[in-house]
Every structure is written in C-alpha cells, then in structure tokens.
C-alpha cells in the first residue's frame, strides 16, 4: 500500500486519482555556489609604507595605462624608495592603527603596480653587483701579482749582467721586454721564486766547480718534483752539503750522512749519491784540471743554441745529454740519467734553451761570447 510519509515520491492527479511517482523524474534546483573560504592573500609580505604608496600610485594611474606607465609612475614616486628604520617603524605603527580602524576586505589582493614599482626601484638602484665586484677584485689581484713577478731581477742582477756583457740598452727597456716576451712556460701564475731563477740564473754559462756540483745535485733531486719547490729549499741543501764544497762533501762519513739526513730531513740515498759524485769530481779534476773543463769539453766550450720558438718543441733529453750521461755513468757518477743531464745542461748554460723571443736568450748568448773571449 502507498504510504503518504514517503518523501522520495511525488503525487500526481491522473484521471482524477492520486498516483505516486518517483522523485528522480523531477529536476533538482541548482545549488548556490559557495564562496571560497579564504580569498587569495598577498604573496609577498611588504612594509606598510609600500602598501600605502602602491595604493596611492594605483589610484593615481589611469585604467588604460600599460605596464610601462605603471613602471614610470612607480619610479617617479619618491615615496617608493626604501624607508629608513625610523620611518619604517612609524609606517608600520600607522598601518597597524589603520588596520584596526578599517579592516581590509577579505578579497583584497596586492596591486600589480607594487611589482612594477619594485622593478623600477631595482633598475634605478646603484650600479654594479656582487659578481661585478668579485670580477674587479680578481682583475686587480692578477695585476698586482704580475707587477710583483715583473719586479724580480730588475735591479742589481740585471745591471751586473748588462755591465759585464757591455750592453748599451738600459735596464728599463729590458725589463719591459721581459714582461712581454718571456719564455712561454713563465706565466702570470708562475711562482715568483721560479720567475726570478729564470730571469737571473737559468741558461747563464757556469764554469765554477762548486756551482756545477750544486746544479748537478739539484737536478737529480728535482726528478719527481718541480723546480719551484726545489728552489724554495735551496738554502737547506746548501747548508746540508757545506755550501757544496766538493772537498768537504767528499769526506763525509756514514755517521755524518745519517746526521745530515736526520737534521735536515733529506733522503739518505740522495745524500749518499751527492757524496759519491763529490768523490768522482775529485777524480775528474785529476784528469782534466777541473770539473768545468770536463763538462764544457762535450760542447767544445761553446753553448748549444737550438733556437726554439715554442716551448712545446723542447725535448726532455737530447743525443748530447745521452752521450754525457753515458760517460759520467762510466766514471761512477750517480743520478745522472739523460733527462737529469739535459736539465743540468739547461741550468748551467751548456745549452741555451731560452726561446728566441725571450730577451734572456740574447743575454745568455752574449754572456757566453764574452766568457769565451
């Protein structure tokens, strides 16, 4: 039977009789759309002075103005500049007071002109940036380093060399030329000690036995290291080997060698090799008169001049260094391989391996000519 309490059914009159009909046939009335619970708030937290300035600027600008007009208006507004701490505090207090008196509507959003004002402020800000300041600092540091490197070997040493070879040019033009056309393996990042060694010693002809003994020892120690580190410890080697006095070093006993190794932190094998070479130099002196005459006899007392134009063309050993190495090994020398001998020849001027574009090439060549004369 039909129940009149059913809410889901509808009653209709058909042929004068009430008839129940399903409620699903009727179209339900559309529900009223609910407003969002919370409107979109400002995405940026700005000071109160920015909000007031932005609102005034927005009200003053016409509705048909574009983004550029907004930016110009914002840039022209003096009150868009960052407030001082005191003014900012006052502005915050005034803004808080106004917010208590007249709360902002729930749907209010940040005006678009605020972003344009910020962009205009960034453009109108002080020139430069952190990256630009860092680049400028690096550039200044490099310039100072180059000036320090250029200072080495510019005063007494060069005057002494120029006076000995009878050069007519002054020291200043040579120093300027050195800054521009040094050997390509000397760069702005090279160690100043190594640069000074290149400008003052490397390639100059050496005939003194003690100096030759020193460079032979340092060339052997340099294997597996770099010249800059060896040159920084040069005073230690000189003190350990009694100023490279051949007669004194040749008399070192095993106890003295162990003491030198412990006192100066040098390898015991290196010390034994140096003592052995000192003994062999004494033997060479008896045969040739001096160690200098022995080594310079391999090049007929005249330095070799390959005339390299690029440092990449420089070999690590040559046929001449191999022949000298074989003879010295035959005489009992130690640490005198072809590569070590080639480095030794470059250091003592047996070969002038300065690039032809380097001013030191001319100085070393002139010095060898004067020594021969």
Image (cartoon, rainbow, N blue to C red):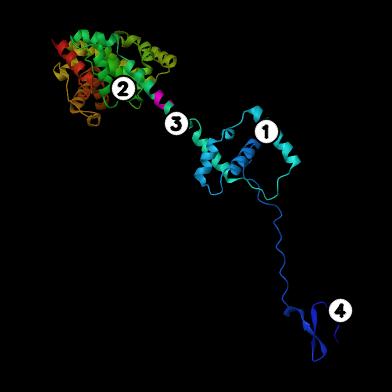
Quarter holding the N terminus is bottom right
Mark nearer the N terminus (3 vs 4): 4
Decide whether residue 142 is among the magenta residues. no
Q: Please name the residue that numbered disc 1 is placed on.
A: 91
Q: Please name the residue that numbered disc 2 is placed on.
A: 220
Res 5 label? 4
Seen in the picture, residue 61 relative to 208 is either above or below; the reply is: below
Q: Position of residue 184 (x, y in %)?
A: 27, 27
The reply to whether callout 3 and callout 1 are in contact (CB within 8 Å) is no
Mark nearer the N terminus (2 vs 4): 4
Examine the rendering and report whether any part of residue 367 can be seen: yes
* Residue occupying the point 86% across, 79% down: 5
**Would residue 244 appear left or right of 1 to someone viewing this image?**
left
Q: Please name the residue that numbered disc 3 is placed on.
A: 132
**Element carrying mark 1:** helix
* Residue occupying the point 71% across, 60% down: 34
Examine the rendering and report whether any part of residue 280 can be seen: no
């Amino acid at each position: 039977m039909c129940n009149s309490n059913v809410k889901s059914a509808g009653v209709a009159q058909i042929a004068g009789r009430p008839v129940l009909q399903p409620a699903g046939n009727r179209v339900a009335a559309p529900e009223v759309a609910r407003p969002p619970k919370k409107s979109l708030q400002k995405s940026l937290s700005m000071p109160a002075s920015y909000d007031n300035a932005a609102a005034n600027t927005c009200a003053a600008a016409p509705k048909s103005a574009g983004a550029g007009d907004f930016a110009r208006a914002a840039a022209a507004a003096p009150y868009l500049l960052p407030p001082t701490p005191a003014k900012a505090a006052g502005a915050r207090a005034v803004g808080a007071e106004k917010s208590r008196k007249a709360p902002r509507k729930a749907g209010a959003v940040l005006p678009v002109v605020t972003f344009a004002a910020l962009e205009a402020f960034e453009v109108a800000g002080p020139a430069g940036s952190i990256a630009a300041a860092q680049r400028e600092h690096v550039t200044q540091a490099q310039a100072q380093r180059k000036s320090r490197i250029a200072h080495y070997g510019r005063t007494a040493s060069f005057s002494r060399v120029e006076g000995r070879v009878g050069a007519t040019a002054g020291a200043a033009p040579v120093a300027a030329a050195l800054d521009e056309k040094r050997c390509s393996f000397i760069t702005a990042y090279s160690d100043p000690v190594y640069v000074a060694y290149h400008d003052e010693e490397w390639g100059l002809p050496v005939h003194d036995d003690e100096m030759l003994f020193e460079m032979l020892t340092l060339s052997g120690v340099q294997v597996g290291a770099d010249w800059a580190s060896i040159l920084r410890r040069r005073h230690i080697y000189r003190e350990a080997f009694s100023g490279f006095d051949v007669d004194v070093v040749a008399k070192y006993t095993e106890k003295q060698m162990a003491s030198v190794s412990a006192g100066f932190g040098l390898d015991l094998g290196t010390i034994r090799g140096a003592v052995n070479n000192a003994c062999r130099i004494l033997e060479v002196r008896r045969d040739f008169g001096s160690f200098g005459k022995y080594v310079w006899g391999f090049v007929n007392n005249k330095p070799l001049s390959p005339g390299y134009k690029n440092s990449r063309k420089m070999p690590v050993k040559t046929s001449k260094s191999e022949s000298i190495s074989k003879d010295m090994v035959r005489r009992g020398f130690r640490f005198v391989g072809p590569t070590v001998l080639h480095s030794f020849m470059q250091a003592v001027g047996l070969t002038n391996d300065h690039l032809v574009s380097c001013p030191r090439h001319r100085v070393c060549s002139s010095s060898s000519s004067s020594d021969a004369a």
